[in-house]
Amino acid sequence: MFKASVRGLFFDGGGVKHIFIIGSKGLPAHHGGFETFVENLTAKKKNENIQYHISCLNSAEKTFKHNGANCFGINVPNWLGSAKAVIYDILALRKSIRFIKQNNFQNSVIYILASRIGLFISLHKKQLKSLGIKLLINPDGLEFKRKKYNWLIRRYWKISERYSVKNADLVVCDSREIQKYIENEYEKFKPKTKFIAYGADLAKSQISDDDLELQNWYSKNNIRPYEFYLVVGRNIPENNFDTIISEFNKSNSQKKLVIISNIKHQFKGKTIFAGALYNQELLRKIREQAFGYIHGHSVGGTNPSLLEAMASTKLNLLFDICFNREVGKNAVLYWSKEKGSLAKLIDEADKMQEQEIEDLGNLAKSRIEKEYSWEMVVGEYEELYGQ
């Protein structure tokens, strides 16, 4: 099992370090965890000897600059359906290799976000080695456990993860629990691993309390500030929406449950499905004015929406799994799938004193500042590259 330091693993000399990142939809980021990660990694770059090259999903295959990064477009037809993301990553990998070869880059890394194309990396491993390209993989979460996929796709994810780890020069994990899993599950490959967290921003929203768009959102959903619990995420089994809604209805809370998700706008009893929301400043303000945030994420590592909630919402109620405990520690409250667990916790939360809630909020923000700030994350990546 790999335990040695990986500092300076990639670059020993000077010169420009060319870092190719593939696997996100690209820049500028509109929403999505990997997209937000790439946006912050490039925007907050400190080392001028690092040049980022970012693959972007666009039909025109445009090339452009954003945050100083070279962005190159990849066109993938929509008719490919669920295979679109896999084809996109393969094409981006091949384009990156060609570009490195044509320009004779000596200090180059290809960083692949997620394990979608592990099987296909093997076909390029010899070429990567001959060009001196170092390969980083971020395995993301445990995709093969997601119930939204059928058994065949889950099987593909598991095999692809295996080959990603086997072929990587370094596996970067944004969760220590995922790092343990990679080291234990693939011990025979002796994988080199490195924990670098995902980040969050502690800055308060720039939207005022009397902002017209904010007030229209409250009016549309028939709620008032601090009189609702908030859930943000996709409607997939792993996010436990059914449990959250059922338990909230069992509770004695007179507040509302607001779900911002890919569900059409509708009212059902105490639950309000508010639809999707892509205005990040507005979403930050709504998080700040929620009485509490309920997080049901149950698969994978560090969840971006959880970090964003802890940075903005004082009272956070988390589904009790190791990944969420790693992030929340003693700054949040926990519930389980046992019947009545969340309902009881909501009732207890409703009765909490203002100072108790304030103390939890300060603890949550302290954890973000000390363990998950974007400045710290960017610094660790730049140190890894050999700053």
Image (tube, rainbow, N blue to C red):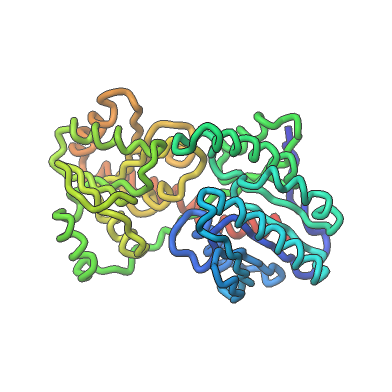
Residue sticking out furthest to the right = 130
Depth check, front residue: 58 or 38: 58
Could you tell me if residue 207 is visible in this image? yes
- Report the side of 168 relative to 373 (left or right): right
Depth check, front residue: 189 or 380: 189
Residue sticking out furthest to the bottom = 64
Residue 172, x across and y down, in percent: 64, 47
The quadrant in which residue 167 appears is top right
Q: Which residue shows up at 41% across the image and 39% down it?
A: 297
Q: Is residue 377 above or below residue 295?
A: below
Residue 206, x across and y down, in percent: 33, 69
Q: Which residue shows up at 86% across the image and 55% down it?
A: 130
Q: Which residue shows up at 40% across the image and 62% down it?
A: 203
Could you tell me if residue 387 is visible in this image? no
Residue 360, x across and y down, in percent: 33, 43
Residue 104, x across and y down, in percent: 83, 69
Residue sticking out furthest to the top = 338
Depth check, front residue: 364 or 21: 21
- Report the side of 151 relative to 179 (left or right): left
- Report the side of 1 relative to 35 (left or right): right
Q: Which residue shows up at 18% across the image and 30% down it?
A: 250
- The quarter in which the C terminus is drawn is bottom right
- The quarter in which the N terminus is drawn is top right
